[in-house]
Amino acid sequence: MTKISKEFIRFFLGLLIVIVVGLVSGYWLIPLFLFLALYISWNFYKLYQLESWMLDGFIEDKLPDSNGIWAGLAHNTLKLKHQADRNKTRQKTLLKRFNNVISSLPDATLVLDAKNEIKWMNHDAARLLKLQRKKDLGHRLDNLFRIPQLHKALGKTSSNKIKIASPSDDNITLMVHVSALKKDTRIIIVRDISQRQQLEESRKYFVANASHELRTPLSVISGYLEILRLKKHQDPEIKNMLDNSYQQAQRMNQLISDLLILSKLENRELSRRKVKPVKLGLIIKDICSHLNKIMGERHVITLDLDLKLSVSGHKKELYSLVENLLSNSLKHTPAGTMVKVSWQLVNKLAVLTVEDNGPGIAEENIAHVTERFFQEYKVEAVQGSGLGLSLVKHIVQRHGARLDISSIPDVSTRFSVTFPD
């Protein structure tokens, strides 16, 4: 029998006594009034006992002595208190563990709430951002630093990365990674990438200058080789050597040209004045026709193009994007391979897709195919510079697009570029 059932029985027994007294004495109101007054007063007293016990700290030895519904309330309250204490202890343990984990991170780390107020930071964050751990806790990060890129990053709900100059030293470059743990909590990780940035700038400078300096002497060598190989009545062995040398010189020339283009893409931002609507379908048709002539129609190319569909961008860069994607499929697949090229509107976004049924790319290599000089498959008939897909990646990034690569070995390989709305 439940506690509330016992309370109902107690109440109805009292009413039954009132009815009996009323029948015997003929007076109903006085017994009923006395019963209700006693019952209500008793309940108020029990309520007072329960409140006093709760205010005293829920001491189990001082649990109010009662029965019926009040006993049930007291026991359930004590049970909930024990459960709350266990949860509190568990949360303290988790919080301590969380703080230990974050404190041990090698990077500067901050924890923000939904209002971008600093709730926690480690020593590295205070040092790198010139913050005071005690004074700046509780302050909004976007009020402490008047940096537009940081404000924009904090305004986004998804995870994102930005590069900013250090608030204390313009010569220091910081990488700020904003990640959402949950709706009301975000973690900020800050890294000093100044040394890496300087090395990257040095590499770009070296590549650009080396490529430029090599171009002139290589052009002279190629010119002399072309003159020699075109002379009549040559020894076949010497002719073969000259042809091979000329091909390698041309390959080096193409490599240098690609390096110079890549250097320009890395060092210059996309000029808004050169961004215009481009009908990519017409460019694809032109490039396919040109490549078919060069490759001798070794492959079967099928087109699915929306010739009226245009995208905003730099025409020369978009031409290079399409040319490199198509060249990649044609160069790294055997003769007879089918290449499908699509330029259509998909879910209201312009999407360029190049798919072939060649040997494919191993899963572990998909993440590396856009790196410089990476080549998984080599077709003897055609040699590439190994920079084509790297150029593609940079052009895609400059246009705010997304490059997706998927492949099933010996079945198909698919390159897809999705342009922003």
Image: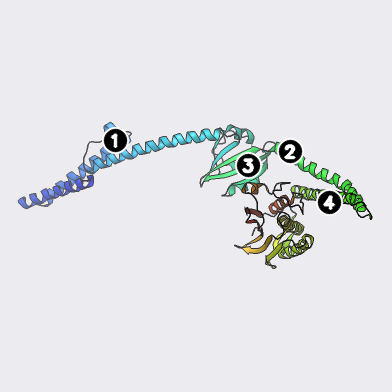
Q: Tell me the element at label 3.
A: strand
Q: Residues within 10 Å of mark 1 (few under 14, many from 20)?
A: some
**Dot placed on the residue nearer the N-terminal end, 4 or 2:** 2
**Dot placed on the residue nearer the N-terminal end, 2 or 3:** 3
Amino acid on which the number 2 mark rests in the picture: Leu
Residues at circles 2 and 3 in contact by the CB criterion of under 8 Å = no
Residues at circles 3 and 1 in contact by the CB criterion of under 8 Å = no
**Which residue has dot 2 on it?**
199
In the image shown, does 167 or 33 lie closer to the viewer?
167
Left or right of residue 167: residue 112: left
**Dot placed on the residue nearer the N-terminal end, 4 or 1:** 1
Q: Which mark is residue 176?
A: 3
Q: Nearer the viewer, mark 4 or mark 1?
A: 4
Q: Residues within 10 Å of mark 2 (few under 14, many from 20)?
A: few
Does residue 128 lie above or below 8 as drawn? above
Q: Tell me the element at label 4.
A: helix
**Which residue has dot 4 on it?**
247
How far apart are the two marked residues, 4 and 2, measured between alpha carbons?
34 Å
In the image shown, does 138 or 362 lie closer to the viewer?
362
How far apart are the two marked residues, 2 and 3, measured between alpha carbons?
19 Å
**Which residue has dot 1 on it?**
53
Amino acid on which the number 4 mark rests in the picture: Gln
How far apart are the two marked residues, 4 and 1, measured between alpha carbons?
95 Å
In the image shown, does 369 or 91 lie closer to the viewer?
369
Q: Position of residue 71 (x, y in %)?
A: 24, 40
